[in-house]
Image (cartoon, coloured by chain):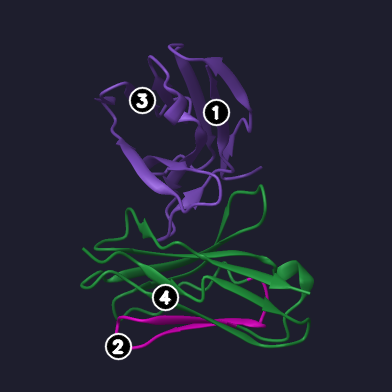
Chain colours: A purple, B green
């Protein structure tokens, strides 16, 4: 089993839609969680950290469910510019971060 | 301000040759990571440096791969006797602490 698993998608949604991605992790001792965004042929960039209490940044909401070992990312009012691959990232106890394979989102006009 | 820089941006080499990839982290960042990403795939951890501690080499796929970090700053990833399966984008990231990283633009390696 992979340490971090994501549905690869693609998720094709119309502009203005709300879309949610989940990511599961296998190591119950994991402490830190992040969502990164990666545009085609570009490097990943930090989108937001995920806190135990859940957190929101504009149209983006991240949540953590430790009991079920998953994190989620909700995007409201999708924009064309949200089209990208969203990478779930977990500190699994090793000192480096473990990345999921990513979920591809395509927002359509 | 200056971000993480990597060179070269693209490298084409012949199978069996050695290559060196360079990463200049953000000044003052103590943590430096190397990852690689094959086409359409996720990021694969290679090696991690944190300050003066021994590097975490647990992700290096074979003994053909090695990395150094000189003076706690610049890092070089060396791949000896390159193989076609080594073709990927090699990404370097640095961080002021180990929890998150700022990525460089990557080096796209193509082994013919």
Residue receiving disc 3: A63
Q: Is residue B79 above or below residue A38?
A: below
**Callout 3 secondary element:** strand
Q: Residues within 10 Å of mark 1 (few under 14, many from 20)?
A: many
Residue receiving disc 4: B23
Q: Decide whether residue B68 is among the magenta residues.
A: yes
Q: Are marks 1 and 4 in contact (CB under 8 Å)?
A: no
Q: Nearer the viewer, residue A51 or A35?
A: A35
Name which quarter of the figure residue A104 lies in: top right
Q: Are marks 1 and 2 in contact (CB under 8 Å)?
A: no
- Mark before the other along the chain sequence, 2 or 4: 4
Q: Is residue A30 above or below residue B28?
A: above
Q: Is residue A44 left or right of residue A56?
A: right
Instruction: Tell me where residue B11 appears, x and y as whole percent.
Output: 61, 75
Q: Which residues are magenta?
A: B61-78
Distance from Cα at disc 4 to Cα at disc 3: 34 Å
Q: Residues within 10 Å of mark 2 (few under 14, many from 20)?
A: few
Residue receiving disc 2: B71
Distance from Cα at disc 1 to Cα at disc 2: 41 Å
Residue receiving disc 1: A105
Name the chain under label 1. A
Discs 2 and 4 carry the same chain letter: yes
Q: Is residue A71 visible?
A: no
Q: Nearer the viewer, residue B71 or B109?
A: B109
């Amino acid at each position: 089993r992979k340490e971090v698993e994501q549905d690869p998608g693609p998720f094709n949604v119309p502009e203005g839609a709300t879309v949610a991605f989940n990511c599961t992790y296998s190591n119950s001792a994991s402490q830190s969680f992040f969502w990164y965004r990666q545009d085609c042929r570009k490097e990943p960039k930090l989108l937001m950290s995920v806190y135990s209490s859940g957190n929101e940044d504009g149209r983006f909401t991240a949540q953590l469910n430790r009991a079920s070992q998953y994190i989620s990312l909700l995007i409201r009012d999708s924009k064309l510019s949200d089209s990208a691959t969203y990478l779930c990232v977990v500190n699994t106890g090793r000192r480096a971060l473990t990345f999921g394979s990513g979920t591809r989102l395509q927002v359509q006009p | 301000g200056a971000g993480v820089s990597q060179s070269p941006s693209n490298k084409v080499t012949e199978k069996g040759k050695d290559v060196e990839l360079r990463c200049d982290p953000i000044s003052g960042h103590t943590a430096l990571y190397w990852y690689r990403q094959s086409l359409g795939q996720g990021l694969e951890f290679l090696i991690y440096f944190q300050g003066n501690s021994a590097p975490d080499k647990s992700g290096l796929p074979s003994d053909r791969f090695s990395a150094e970090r000189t003076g706690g700053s610049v890092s070089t990833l060396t791949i000896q006797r390159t193989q076609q399966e080594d073709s990927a984008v090699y990404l370097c990231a640095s961080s002021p602490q180990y929890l998150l990283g700022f990525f460089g633009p990557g080096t796209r390696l193509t082994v013919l």
